[in-house]
Image: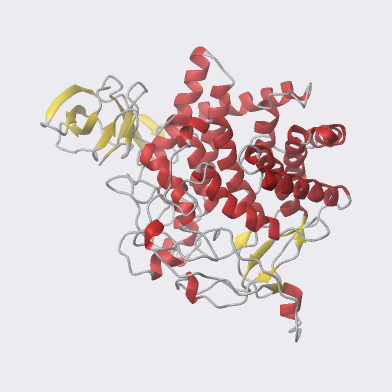
């Protein structure tokens, strides 16, 4: 039995629903003074198919005074302690961004900025092309490919995931600049550029190195095989430049167009370079058809394969149409072509970036897409309403059906919150509030209002996960992980030995999770699982 809450807390004026796995009367207890501020009874039973159980809702929306609280049931069961306050997500938002600093590659992380999570400069040796490595070429050409963020629990760096993660962050800044002015205590702090943009620049400057002279972009930069669980500076395997892919090139074109727009007031020289690189990538796309990617035999680093690049080309055309007015006619022509292709328009992950095109089109102040806008608006609201219906039927107020608990399900949770936020921003009155509440419910789930009573963000909540699949976390000898990392979360078909041994066959999808460092299929961290959570918290903590 349990009573599950958002372990970080709730905004004063918003709906507040806790989940109980049993019928009960309840009291809301103010932790200071141990006094009851509300009592009531839980709702009737509601089906929660993703969790394989019935649940009961505890509505304590009437509690609005700032403070620390917990919920106490009549049988003595109690929830974790949580806060109510206007700034309840401020520290979380900051930590979600600062976590990316800990992923910096190619530089030393010193105590001044990293606290106890220090390490020496890593992966500074020159890189070579994969084909030269495989052929054992005696004197291969070498390249300086240092910089960027480690993508996930490994030390690889990948163009498409990097583009999507940076895009989430730059869009968050475009939408909610007042919410993202905090200082992160990073080496660039105080240079006149907001720190979220400083941190993104570290990744973007590395991405520029991933563009070939032809304009195409290399798919990834990794060793041939994943490193052992060692500190980054102790990984000395050669880093290899893998071949160009059309997905990577289109993602690069899109995010560099976006970056040129965002950085124009802060770093005009970089903004010009970014747009030039974007247009060069676009020219490559115009002269090349789909060019996929698969690992060569024996290589096991992240593949990030994608059998379709139309959604990436859609996003690139939308971003360049909005940013590069000089050639808008050619971008609009392609945008119209891709719009009519049978691809989704509502996803925000690395494998399907179509929702980023929708975002770009619908929030373009110059309305460059013209008559196409209405169809994108219709598609967005159809999906938002579908998600609201799933949420209504879920028991846990989560817009996730049982089949949606894929590898990295928490990315889906966060990305669906982005779509609901966009629907709220495009609505007024009761409709805007409906979508806002639905988006906030996704955050409540992430922070503990779920069937495992766990906060999926390190360092936030009384029962936050502690053992991410992340090499430095394992190797640094420090008991607790870096704060602010989002776990991949429950996976309906766990496939690593740690998860398979811990999760019984037939377990409900929402419960298919294990907090174990070896569980790469349920408990890894990645830059693009944090980035949509930043967008989400920036909206709610303006």
Quarter holding the N terminus is top left
Reply above or below: 101 against 356.
below
Between 232 and 79, the residue placed more toward the observer is 232
Please indicate whether residue 383 sits to the left or right of residue 297 in the image: left
- Give coordinates of residue 431: x percent, y percent: 52, 16
Q: Quadrant of residue 338?
A: top right
Q: Is residue 284 visible?
A: yes
| Scheme of image coloration | secondary structure
Reply above or below: 140 against 286.
below
- Residue at 39% x, 67% y is 474
Q: Quadrant of residue 367?
A: top right
Please identify the residue farthest to the top as the structure is shown: 429
Quarter holding the C terminus is top left
- Give coordinates of residue 425: x percent, y percent: 56, 23
Please identify the residue farthest to the bottom as the structure is shown: 138
Please identify the residue farthest to the front as the structure is shown: 191
- Residue at 65% x, 49% y is 351
Please indicate whether residue 23 sits to the left or right of residue 50 in the image: left
Q: Is residue 349 visible?
A: no
- Give coordinates of residue 528: x percent, y percent: 55, 49
- Residue at 40% x, 32% y is 395
- Give coordinates of residue 25: x percent, y percent: 19, 26
Please indicate whether residue 96 sits to the left or right of residue 88 in the image: right
């Amino acid at each position: 039995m349990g009573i599950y809450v958002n372990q970080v807390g709730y905004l004063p004026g918003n709906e507040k629903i806790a989940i109980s796995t049993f019928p009960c009367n309840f009291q809301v207890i103010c932790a200071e003074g141990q006094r009851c501020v509300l009592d009531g009874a839980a709702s009737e039973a509601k089906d929660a198919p993703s969790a394989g159980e019935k649940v009961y809702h505890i509505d304590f929306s009437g509690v609005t005074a700032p403070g620390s609280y917990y919920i106490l049931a009549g049988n003595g069961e109690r929830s974790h302690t949580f806060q109510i306050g206007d700034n309840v997500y401020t520290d979380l938002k900051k930590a979600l961004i600062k976590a990316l600093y800990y992923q910096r590659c190619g530089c030393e992380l010193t105590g001044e900025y990293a606290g106890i999570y220090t390490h020496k400069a890593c992966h500074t040796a020159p890189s070579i092309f994969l084909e030269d490595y495989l052929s054992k070429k005696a004197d291969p050409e070498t390249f300086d490919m240092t910089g960027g963020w480690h993508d996930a629990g490994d030390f690889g760096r990948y163009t498409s995931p990097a583009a999507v993660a940076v895009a989430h962050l730059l869009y968050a800044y475009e939408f909610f600049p007042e919410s993202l002015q905090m200082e992160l205590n990073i080496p660039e702090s105080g240079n006149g550029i907001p720190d979220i943009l400083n941190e993104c620049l570290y990744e973007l400057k590395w991405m520029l190195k991933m563009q070939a002279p032809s304009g195409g972009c290399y798919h990834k930069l990794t060793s041939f095989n994943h490193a052992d669980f060692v500190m980054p500076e102790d990984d000395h395997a050669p880093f290899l430049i893998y071949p160009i892919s059309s997905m990577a090139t289109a993602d690069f074109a899109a995010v560099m167009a976006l970056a040129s727009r965002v950085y124009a007031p802060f770093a005009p020289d970089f903004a010009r370079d970014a747009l030039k690189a974007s247009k060069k990538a676009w020219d490559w796309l115009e002269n090349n058809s789909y060019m996929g990617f698969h690992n060569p035999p024996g290589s096991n680093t992240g593949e990030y394969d994608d059998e379709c690049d139309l959604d990436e080309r859609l996003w690139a055309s939308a971003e360049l149409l909005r940013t590069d007015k000089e050639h808008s006619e050619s971008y609009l022509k392609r945008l119209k072509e891709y719009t009519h292709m049978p691809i989704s328009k509502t996803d925000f992950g690395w494998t399907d970036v179509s929702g980023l095109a929708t975002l770009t089109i619908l929030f373009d102040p110059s309305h460059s897409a013209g008559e196409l806008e209405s169809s994108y608006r219709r598609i967005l609201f159809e999906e938002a309403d579908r998600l609201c219906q799933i949420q209504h039927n879920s028991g846990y107020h989560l817009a996730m059906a049982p089949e949606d608990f894929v590898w990295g399900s928490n990315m889906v949770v966060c990305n669906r919150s982005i779509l609901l936020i966009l629907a709220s921003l495009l609505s007024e009155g009761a409709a805007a509030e409906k979508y806002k509440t639905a988006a906030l419910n996704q955050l409540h789930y992430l922070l503990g209002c779920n069937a495992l009573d766990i906060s999926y963000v390190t360092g936030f909540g009384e029962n936050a996960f502690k053992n991410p699949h992340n090499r430095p976390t394992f190797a640094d000898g420090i008991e607790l992980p870096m704060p602010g990392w989002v776990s991949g979360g429950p996976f309906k078909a766990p496939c690593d030995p740690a998860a398979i041994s811990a999760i019984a066959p037939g377990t409900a999808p929402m419960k298919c999770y294990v907090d174990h460092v070896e569980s790469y299929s349920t408990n890894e961290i990645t830059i693009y699982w944090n980035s949509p959570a930043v967008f989400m918290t920036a909206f709610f903590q303006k």
